[in-house]
Image (spheres, rainbow, N blue to C red):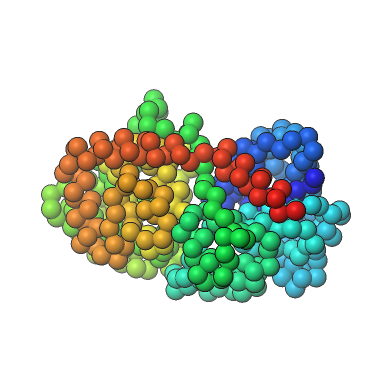
Amino acid sequence: MKIAIDVQSLYSTTPSGVGHYVLETILAMQPDEHTELIFFSRGFSPLVLPETLRRIPHVRHIHRRFPNKLINGLIALRLVSLEHLLGESVDAVWFPNTGYLPRTTAPTVLTVHDLAWYLIPETYNWMHHVRYRITRARTALHRVTKLIAVSDSTQRDLTLHFGRSSKNSLTILHGLDHDLFQERPRPDDATRRQQLGITQPYLLSLATCEPRKNLPSLVDAFDQLRAQGHHIHLVLAGGRGWKRKALNRAIARSPYKQEIHLLGFVSDADRPALLRGARALVLPSRYEGFGMQIVEAMACGTPVVTSRNSSLLEIGSDAVLSARAMNTNELTQTIDQLLNDSNLQKELHQRGIKRAQTFQWSTCAQQTLDTLIKSV
């Protein structure tokens, strides 16, 4: 059996969240000798796969050296098929993300990470909307054989808004790198934080600076906490994102702006040190398809305050505190409750460690492989 896997998301020196998902899922797959994995990608420059992927048995990598814009245009117009790109037919195809999906005669499985582009379109810029129109994201959700949702919340959204029932969609949760994210401090944790300019107690946000993450509300809540006497800093770690005006205004008017740290993109090597040193991870998002930061924080023993919507309480369960996303006073009160209650902190620490252990890449990989095999 030949299974084709789109590895285009690895075509970057700093893989995105989807890139990590693809890499970790493939690494944890254990195909038998009758199953061959064919990785496919495209782009003018060659894609050099991580050595860990190249060592997997029963795999091949097919890369077509064409300009991405040209190939994507042909795919969008449905003028080129996967069989043309591969030069052969396959038994099943896994697309790990919505995007430019070449037509194919093989059964297809598509992973849907969230539907934010559809549910809260105002949080995206015009370039995102053009891309979703060109790639015909809505059509793709109906065209594929099977959909994988990364949470029950996302699966419910697929059923409600696109009519994809449990017969042709299922939930497969992400895993976690438990060697990287663990509660035991490492010798260089303090040094890593110092190199990032963090030496005082702090609240942590790990999120791209975009409207969906609701960071202006977090800044306003931080201002209230400081005014109440909490001597903490606020660390905002994440990519630059888009539509930052509201966040920039919130920081500019803050009387405590000198205690707000904008770190930008943070490497995987630094994330655990930041999490282990934080008084709490705060993720007040308006919507999430999964919420990987929550699992990372729980594994590091860090208390979490998040929003009461979408997938967030599904992922955090009883190991996190929550507030309404757009209610700054409620968010402030919830964080204040956590900071003032050491017993609550210990309880969330213990619950979080236990909850994080339920997220395993081996489980995600096996369920994904089984779905591909059963799609034939």
Q: Where does residue 255 sit, x and y in percent of width and height?
A: 20, 59
- The extreme left residue here reads 228
Which quadrant of the figure has residue 208? bottom left
- The extreme right residue here reads 87
Query: Split into 4 quadrants, where in the image is the N terminus?
Result: top right
Looking at this view, is 300 or 268 the one in front? 300
Looking at this view, is 204 or 296 the one in front? 296
Which quadrant of the figure has residue 54? top right
Q: Where does residue 154 sit, x and y in percent of width and height?
A: 49, 60
Looking at this view, is 288 or 376 the one in front? 376
Q: Is residue 81 left or right of residue 202?
A: right
Q: Where does residue 306 sit, x and y in percent of width and height?
A: 33, 53
* Residue at image location 58% in from the left, 66% down from the top: 164
* Residue at image location 45% in from the left, 48% down from the top: 292
**Image position of 292 with respect to 32: above or below:** below
Q: Is residue 287 left or right of residue 15?
A: left
Q: Is residue 70 visible?
A: no
Q: Is residue 98 visible?
A: yes
